């Protein structure tokens, strides 16, 4: 049995953490992102609340099925969120962060100490005490529930089964595990081996992944990572690190003035930075994002690394507002998507998404491809990528694009990368080695001018 992380400084009562987790879970159910929900949590509570909340979201399908066994009608949103929080954390004693009895006692205490929950305290107490008495029978009764078994919405499970019939179980299992903290080494400034040696001397264990990545043995604040503040490394998943490498490998500028590269949906700036780290100093990089606030984040990340790009707040699909008419040697289109490939890091995504989102986002992706392709020079390249495992946002999207653009040639690229943890390498032999999120990559070369 593992112990949930304690907050730094004075210990925070568990009931208070459960109270905050329930409030955050209720917000996620209303459509608020987990990140935004956590931002509303007091800083002293946030580390412990995040750890517990992520575990709840990874077990929410089972918790909801158990709650349906315990109550014929769902209680109001906040009491239901607290009940499901306790059930998600306590249903599997081997993986519970605290003893189930402790979790139940503290959940009831949270209800008693929360004005909007006090009227439901007796109901919650009755449900949770019954759960403790009948746990094994209740769990068996929910074993046949698809959402309880896989802790994803039933439509999501069905979609992954259709899109990845040979690997759907591995994908869903990977989604329910926490991802490690992975960083990209700025090899313009330091070799990966040299930075890893520096980390070892500071007691920071790591292992390599991909060409430039290091995976920490244990996640920590970036301020506690040697070299981070100096711009020697950046947090970035191993699959995401493939973007700049794929686009730039073998690409040469059409003119002597330097490479012209566009990062069309750039925030928060990790891929923009990687492009700049790999490009010569005379390259011209434009970084677009539709959200001005997110553009500020791009600029901040580049400043930490000592890099510069032309950062513009604009819609990539409306080029009249930002494009100067000069074609690009390379375009990186990391298109808006369901984020179904990064559920390990963002366990709220599965509960925020609706099945109808897929078609809506696929239409946005299709339009972005249509608008950006004319900006690629003959012989230039566009790298289309999404952090999605759904074929509608990957292979199906590219098939349609190639049918309508005869001047596009698909170059060797990864296609769909499935999320996997390090211990899955042996079973996913046609995936990239090592730990990484789910992604889709298609590298397109323009063969001639139309």
Image (cartoon, helix red, strand yellow):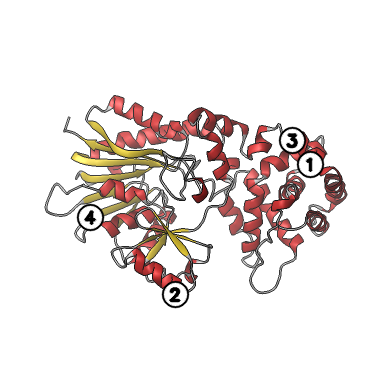
Could you tell me how far apart the alpha carbons at marks 2 and 4 are, in whole angstroms? Answer: 38 Å
Badge 4 is on which residue? 284
- Of tags 2 and 3, the one toward the viewer is 2
Looking at the rendered image, the quarter that the N terminus falls into is bottom right
Dot 1 or dot 3, earlier in sequence: 1
Mark with earlier residue (1, 4): 1
Report which residue position mark 1 lands on. Answer: 75
Residue visible at 34% across and 48% down?
Answer: 243
Return the disc, 4 or 3, that comes first in the chain's sequence. Answer: 3
User: At which x and y percent is residue 120?
Assistant: 84, 48
Q: Quadrant of residue 106?
A: bottom right
Query: Label 4: few (<14), some or many (≥20) within 10 Å?
Result: some
Judged by depth in the image, the label closer to the viewer, 4 or 3, is: 3
Quarter occupied by the C terminus:
top left
Cα distance in 3D space between marks 1 and 3: 19 Å
What residue would you read off at disc 3? 142
x, y (%) of residue 442? 33, 38
């Amino acid at each position: 049995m593992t112990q949930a992380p304690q907050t730094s400084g004075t210990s925070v009562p568990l009931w208070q953490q459960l109270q905050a987790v329930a409030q955050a879970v209720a917000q996620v159910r209303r459509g608020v992102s987990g990140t935004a929900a956590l931002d509303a949590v007091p800083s002293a509570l946030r580390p412990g609340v995040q750890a517990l909340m992520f575990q709840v979201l990874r077990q929410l399908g089972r918790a909801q099925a158990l709650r349906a066994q315990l109550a014929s009608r769902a209680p109001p949103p906040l009491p239901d969120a607290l009940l499901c929080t306790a059930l998600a954390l306590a249903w599997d004693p081997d993986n519970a962060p605290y003893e189930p009895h402790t979790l139940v006692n503290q959940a009831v205490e949270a209800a008693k100490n929360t004005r909007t929950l006090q009227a439901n305290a007796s109901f919650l107490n009755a449900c949770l005490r019954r759960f403790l008495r009948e746990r094994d029978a209740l769990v068996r009764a929910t074993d046949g529930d698809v959402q309880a078994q896989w802790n994803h919405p039933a439509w999501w499970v069905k979609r992954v089964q259709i899109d990845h019939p040979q690997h759907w179980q591995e994908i869903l299992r990977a989604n329910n595990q926490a991802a490690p903290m992975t960083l990209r080494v700025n090899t313009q400034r330091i070799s990966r081996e040299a930075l890893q040696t520096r980390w070892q001397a500071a007691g920071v264990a790591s292992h390599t992944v991909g060409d430039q990545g290091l995976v920490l043995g244990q996640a920590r604040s970036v301020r506690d990572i040697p070299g981070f503040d100096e711009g020697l490394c950046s947090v970035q998943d191993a699959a995401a690190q493939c973007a700049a490498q794929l686009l730039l490998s073998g690409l040469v500028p059409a003119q002597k003035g330097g490479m012209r590269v566009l990062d069309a949906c750039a925030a928060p700036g990790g891929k923009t930075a990687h492009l700049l780290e790999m490009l010569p100093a005379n390259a011209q990089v434009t970084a677009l994002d539709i959200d001005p606030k997110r553009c500020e984040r791009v600029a901040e990340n580049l400043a930490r690394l000592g890099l510069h790009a032309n950062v513009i707040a604009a819609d990539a699909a409306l080029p009249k507002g930002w494009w100067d008419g000069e074609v690009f040697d390379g375009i990186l289109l990391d298109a808006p998507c369901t984020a179904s490939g990064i559920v390990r890091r963002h366990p709220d995504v599965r509960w925020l998404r609706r099945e109808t989102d897929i078609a809506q986002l696929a239409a946005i992706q299709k339009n972005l491809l249509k608008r950006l392709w004319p900006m690629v020079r003959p012989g230039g390249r566009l790298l289309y990528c999404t952090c999605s495992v759904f074929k509608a946002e990957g292979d199906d999207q590219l098939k349609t694009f190639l049918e309508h653009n005869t001047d596009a040639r698909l170059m060797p690229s990864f296609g769909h990368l499935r999320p996997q943890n390090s211990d899955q390498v042996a079973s996913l032999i046609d995936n990239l080695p090592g730990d990484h999120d789910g992604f889709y990559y298609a590298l397109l070369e323009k063969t001639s001018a139309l």
